[in-house]
Amino acid sequence: MHDGITVRAGECTTTFDGNRVRAHEQRGRMVAVVKPDNTVLVHDAEGYQPVAWLTRAESVTVGPDRIEAVDGDQQLAVECHEHFGGATYPASAAGTPVGDCPDCDGALVHGSDAVTCPNCDARYGVPADAAVLTDEPCDCGLPRMRVERGREFEVCVDRSCESLDDAVAAAFDREWDCPNCTGELRILRRGGLLAGCEHYPDCDTGFGVPTGTVDGQCDCGLPAFATPTGRRCLDPACSVSQSL
């Protein structure tokens, strides 16, 4: 892995080996880009598609006249004969702007699984289905998020400020009976957010709390959920949920 994005521009020769379809040698005035995840792209003057590339290579070596990327039996080499310029620049993942960072003068952005600040590297993990709200920030200055876990919750993106787990537990802890023993289902964090039997490990019954809101009851006795893909039982393997 490399820090930042490295750019090299010049008259170069690119060679690619290890893939019969893509094997080639090309020369021209080109720009090579090395990303922090070891992706190497080489662009010429035409179109948007690179003339040579290797995605997330196992190793990348960047020297003054040569860039070499290796991934298994595939190898991409960029040999620079005449330099036009080059440098390494700071880089981060891009996202939707969602407010100002309370810790610095940077802008917070929402990516696929987190709210981050590219300026100070602050990071707050958020569920993939969360809607990050920009109109009414939390008292701490961070944005809040809207998430459906049995019902709709609005909490701070910083779990140490407001815990989504605590909010779901306050609403649904012990609300449902275990279908396999006399226990009640607790709201727990075990990798994901679960409704798990209080008698664990004697009873290992547990169901992931799905994205969606409680919508009545399944014929099996567990709650039914209205989810983005349709109505379903809390138990995804429920044998009677087909009637929902």
Image (tube, rainbow, N blue to C red):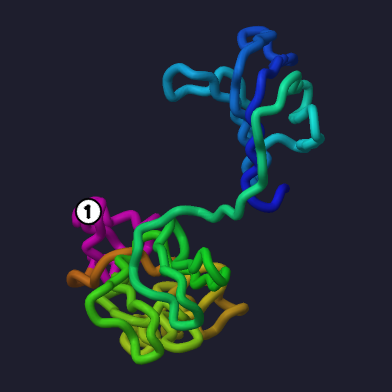
- The answer to whether 121 appears left or right of 11 in the picture is left
Left or right: 12 as drawn, with respect to 151: right
Residue 74 in sight? no
Placement of 187 over or under 88, stated as above or below: below
Q: Secondary structure at mark 1?
A: strand
- The image shows residue 199, relative to residue 93, as above or below, that is below
Q: Which residue has dot 1 on it?
A: 230
Q: Residue at x 42, y 19 (%)?
A: 47
Q: Percent from the top left, x then y, of residue 143?
A: 35, 77
Location of residue 77 in the rendering, given as x and y in whole percent from the top left corner: 75, 22
Which picture quadrant has residue 202? bottom right
**Amino acid at dot 1:** Gly
Residue 226 part of the magenta-drawn span: yes
Magenta region: which residues? Answer: 218-244
Residue at x-position 56% and y-position 18%: 51
Observer-nearest of 78 and 84: 84
The foreground one among 98 and 192 is 98
Q: Where is residue 23, by image quadrant?
A: top right
Residue 24 in the image: x percent, y percent? 67, 8
Q: Position of residue 158 (x, y in %)?
A: 46, 80
| Residue at left offset 46%, top offset 60% | 113
In the rendered image, which quarter contains the C terminus? bottom left
- Counting every numbered tag in the picture gives 1
The residue lying at 33 percent from left, 74 percent from top is 145
> Left or right of 53: which side holds 184?
left
Q: Is residue 130 left or right of residue 84?
A: left
Q: Is residue 209 above or below residue 46?
A: below
Q: In the image shown, does 235 or 147 lie closer to the viewer?
A: 147
Please identify the quarter of the rendering in which residue 218 is found: bottom left
